[in-house]
């Protein structure tokens, strides 16, 4: 590769890296502001970040975990699928069936909330990955732009006389 082509590749890499860093940072900021706008606070009974405002990846994860704990506590530890199976075992329309349906609806809503929070956590991960790749591209670009051409070493002819045995 010629010196000018290497320099151009380096400059393009640096520009791409800067764009990646900016895009990742903007994504991180948007997700954070959207979560913060919901005014969610991790409940005090959470084992992780109790009382913290949900506006980052760790607090979103903590909120998702405590939602699951609360949902399972309200169903005696039964999941959505287990509640569906229990509903098939009782008479439809009975008080027990209606109670199971209410529990199942509650667990379903909790599942939707958890999925939304986990989507935020994944978004943070992707934003961090993109910013990390941006740093890598900047470093590669910097390395390419600082390469120096080294003159080729002169070739010295060696005396090669045939040897007979």
Image (tube, grey):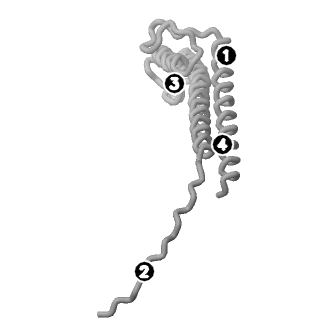
Give the mark toward the camera: 2 or 4.
Answer: 2
Report, in whole angstroms, how far the alpha carbon at label 2 lies from the one at label 1. 76 Å
Residue 104, visible in the rendered structure: no
Residue for badge 4: 13
User: Badge 2: how crowded within 10 Å, few (<14), some, or many (20+)?
Assistant: few
| Above/below status of 14 relative to 154 | above
Q: Earlier in the sequence, mark 3 or mark 2?
A: 3
Q: In the drawing, what numbered circle is on residue 54? A: none
CA gap, disc 1 and disc 4: 30 Å
- Seen at 63% across and 44% down, the residue is 145
Task: Please identify the quarter of the rendering in which residue 55 is found.
Answer: top right
- For label 1, the residue is 33
User: Rounded to the nearest whole Å, what is the CA distance between mark 1 and mark 3?
Assistant: 46 Å
Mark 3 closeness class: few <14, some 14–19, many ≥20 residues within 10 Å = some
- Using the image as rendered, state which of residue 29 and residue 34 is in the foreground: 29
Cβ atoms under marks 1 and 3 closer than 8 Å: no
Q: Residue at x 52, y 30 (%)?
A: 81
Of the two numbered discs 2 and 1 on the same chain, state the one appearing first in sequence.
Answer: 1
Confirm or deny contact between disc 1 and disc 4 (CB under 8 A).
no
Q: Secondary structure at mark 1?
A: helix
- Whole-number angstrom distance, CA of label 2 to CA of label 4: 47 Å
Which tag is nearer the camera, tag 1 or tag 3? 1
**Picture coordinates of residue 89, whole percent (x, y):** 50, 28
Of pointers 2 and 4, the one earlier in the residue sequence: 4
Q: What is the quadrant of the N terminus in the image?
A: bottom right
Q: Is residue 56 left or right of residue 164?
A: right
Residue at mark 2: 159
Of pointers 4 and 3, the one earlier in the residue sequence:
4
Callout 4 crowding tier (Cα within 10 Å): few <14, some 14–19, many ≥20: many
Front residue of 37/96: it is 37
Q: Are marks 2 and 1 in contact (CB under 8 Å)?
A: no
């Amino acid at each position: 590769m010629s010196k000018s082509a290497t320099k151009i590749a380096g400059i393009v890499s640096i520009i791409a890296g800067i764009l990646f860093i900016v895009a990742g940072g903007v994504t991180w900021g948007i997700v954070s502001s959207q979560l913060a706008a919901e005014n969610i606070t991790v409940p005090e009974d959470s084992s992780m970040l109790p009382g913290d405002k949900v506006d980052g990846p760790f607090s979103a994860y903590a909120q998702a975990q405590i939602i699951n704990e609360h949902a399972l506590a309200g169903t005696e530890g039964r999941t959505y699928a287990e509640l569906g199976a229990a509903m098939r075992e009782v008479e439809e329309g009975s008080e027990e069936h209606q109670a199971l349906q209410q529990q199942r609806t509650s667990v379903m809503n909790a599942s939707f909330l958890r999925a939304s929070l986990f989507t935020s956590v994944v978004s943070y991960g992707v934003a961090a990955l993109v910013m990390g790749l941006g740093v890598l591209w900047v470093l590669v670009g910097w390395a390419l732009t600082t390469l120096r051409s080294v003159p080729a070493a002169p070739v010295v002819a060696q005396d090669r006389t045939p040897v007979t045995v």
